[in-house]
Image (tube, grey):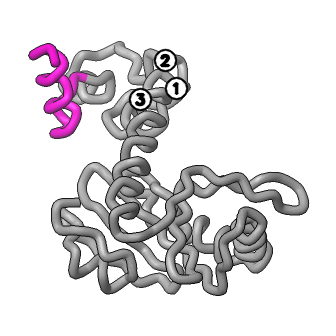
Amino acid sequence: MFPRIFIRGIQLRCNLLRTRVRSARHGHGGQTILCRGNCGQPEGSVHILQSCWITHDARCARHNRVARELAKYLRPLGYTVFEVLRAPTSTYFIKPDLIAVRDHRATVTDVIVISNVREVTVWNKKKQKYGAGEYSFTIISALRAIGFDVDFFVYQSMIISYRVHAIHTIDGNSRNSSRLMSSEMAEIGLGLPEDF
């Protein structure tokens, strides 16, 4: 990695990146604060990290890396892991990031990389989506169609923001830490190792 890119990454992570919003705070009058990507939004660190179309591909790649990393840890624990399995509903397909199957139990996990402000909102939307009877029936039916006898379904979201990691279960319990510990993961049924 080039030193310039490394330094820019640290600046972005620490909210020190020179953005238009940050520059406008220091009295450089007459300057527009709108994003250079013509998004129509103020150009701040959170906008760049979470919603700007210019960084969309990088955000998708980051999301996919997190999902692959989680799948990598689940496979040695005896889970059969499906990444982005398409399950048809009555009107469209649902595609959860990961479905981990072990002992007649399917654990559906969506990896969510968000800003802190939206964590509760996003969690509630996912909880409503996967808590609905049609979705759980659709996923169980899709797994049975490919030969997995699943009797029990649970949804867990893995929410990662630039400040904290969180695992949320369908009943609303959450575990927050700067690193996810295996004891916490065992409590919610995944049993991931400490180095995750």
- Circles 3 and 2 in contact, beta carbons < 8 Å: no
Where residue 65 sits, quadrant-wise, is top left
For the image, the number of numbered tags is 3
Residue 88 seen in the figure: yes
Q: Is residue 8 magenta?
A: yes
Instruction: Assess disc 2: are there few (<14), some (14-19) or many (≥20) residues with their C-alpha within 10 Å of its C-alpha.
Output: few
Residue sitting at x 16%, y 39% = 14
Residue sitting at x 43%, y 50% = 67
Question: Where is mark 1, residue-wise?
Answer: 53
- Circles 1 and 3 in contact, beta carbons < 8 Å: no
Residue 121 seen in the figure: no
What are the residue bounds of the magenta stretch?
A: 1-18
Instruction: Assess disc 3: are there few (<14), some (14-19) or many (≥20) residues with their C-alpha within 10 Å of its C-alpha.
Output: few
Residue 21 point in image, percent of width and height: 32, 28
SS category of the residue bearing label 1: helix
Indicate the amino acid at tag 1: Trp
- Circles 2 and 1 in contact, beta carbons < 8 Å: yes
Residue sitting at x 52%, y 26% = 53
Q: Nearer the viewer, mark 3 or mark 2?
A: 3
Where residue 118 sits, quadrant-wise, is bottom left
SS category of the residue bearing label 2: loop
Question: Where is mark 2, residue-wise?
Answer: 37
Question: Where is mark 3, residue-wise?
Answer: 58
Q: CA distance from mark 2 to mark 1?
A: 7 Å
In this picture, residue 43 sits left or right of residue 175? right
- Location of the C terminus (image quadrant): bottom left
Indicate the amino acid at tag 3: Ala
